[in-house]
Image: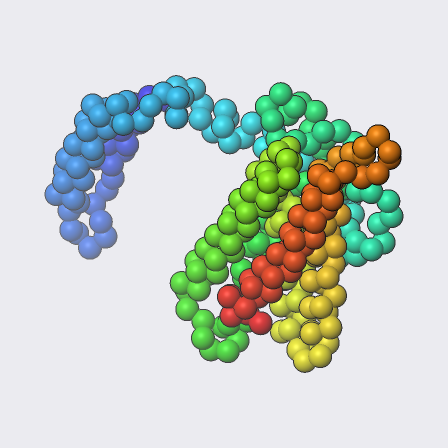
Amino acid sequence: MSLNNFYNDFNSNTQQQPQQQGGFPTQFGNNQFNQYASTAKNLFTAFGPQLIPDNIIPTGNFAEKWIFNSYVRSFFDIDNMYILRKMKLILFPFLQRGEWEVKVNEYASSSQEQNFISPKDNPHSPDLYLPLMGLITFVLVSCLSVGIGDNFQPEIIQRNTSYCLFITFIEIYLYKFLFFLVGIKNIGILNMLSHLSYRFLSLTCILICNLSFGGWFTFILMVYLLTTSVFFIFKTLKRYIQTMSDSFGEVNFQELSQKNILYLMSIIQLAVSYLLLKITNAY
């Protein structure tokens, strides 16, 4: 449907609305709204193509081409069995033996999108369903924790969500910069977003335990879950380091630098997770 047809249909439907209850006519309100809508339509028709370049919003279906493409959809291709296996991997990573490898290349480049394995076929593949649900649950439980103390206000939901998203994206670009310093450039933004956002599941468990029990039990659980979160991110990001050896079979300096960066990132993960608990006033 073109833009002109959309506005014509909208205006015709608006003019056909009945009068409001109580006998007050709506003719004046409709005429005034139609005048504003007509003016906005004319302005957008005249200046819209000049303000929005074709390379930003193509003439085709924008959502299908840039948002709901096959690569992004693959991050949500999960099932119940995958959720159980992934939660076990996040909460009990010490039980997983060996290296956490994916079956195919998962790097976020357009030439390799067709090789991205579905998460439901490999629990080590990143997904965005669990991080999204974890973030939403963490924000709601944190607001519940604040509300129990009679300090809840509606804007707390927006504030906590903004804090979580802002800190997460700052951390993503910090990690990308650190990886760039040691020559690792094969990690996509969506992959990093997935890997780092799994911590919201652990943080939600901490908040629920704090609401239910509190005291030393919550403290012990917090220490355990933060430790597992650090171990999880270390083992996950380690897959991007390629083993490189010199002619004598010894690991070279670049690989040592990459492993040191992983240790630094693990410490950052621990600090950021604790910061999210404090900055939301939930713990």
Q: Residue at 78% across / 47% down in the picture? A: 85
Judging depth in this view, the residue of 258 and 205 nearest the camera is 258
Q: Residue at 20% across / 55% down in the picture? A: 22
Residue 202: image x %, image y %?
A: 67, 60
Quarter occupied by the C terminus: bottom right
Residue 160: image x %, image y %?
A: 48, 60
Above or below, 173 against 43 in this view is below
> In screen coordinates, is 78 left or right of 31?
right
Q: Residue at 41% across / 64% down in the picture? A: 154
Q: Residue at 55% across / 62% down in the picture? A: 276
Above or below, 223 against 12 in this view is below
Q: Quadrant of residue 13?
A: top left
Above or below, 104 against 217 in this view is above
Q: How is the image coloured?
A: rainbow
Q: How many marks?
A: 0
Judging depth in this view, the residue of 256 and 16 nearest the camera is 256
Residue 28: image x %, image y %?
A: 12, 43
Quarter occupied by the N terminus: top left
Residue 189: image x %, image y %?
A: 57, 38
Q: Is residue 84 visible?
A: no
Judging depth in this view, the residue of 30 and 25 nearest the camera is 30
> In screen coordinates, is 167 left or right of 240?
left
In the picture as drawn, the residue positioned furthest to the bottom comes out as 215
Q: Is residue 234 visible?
A: yes
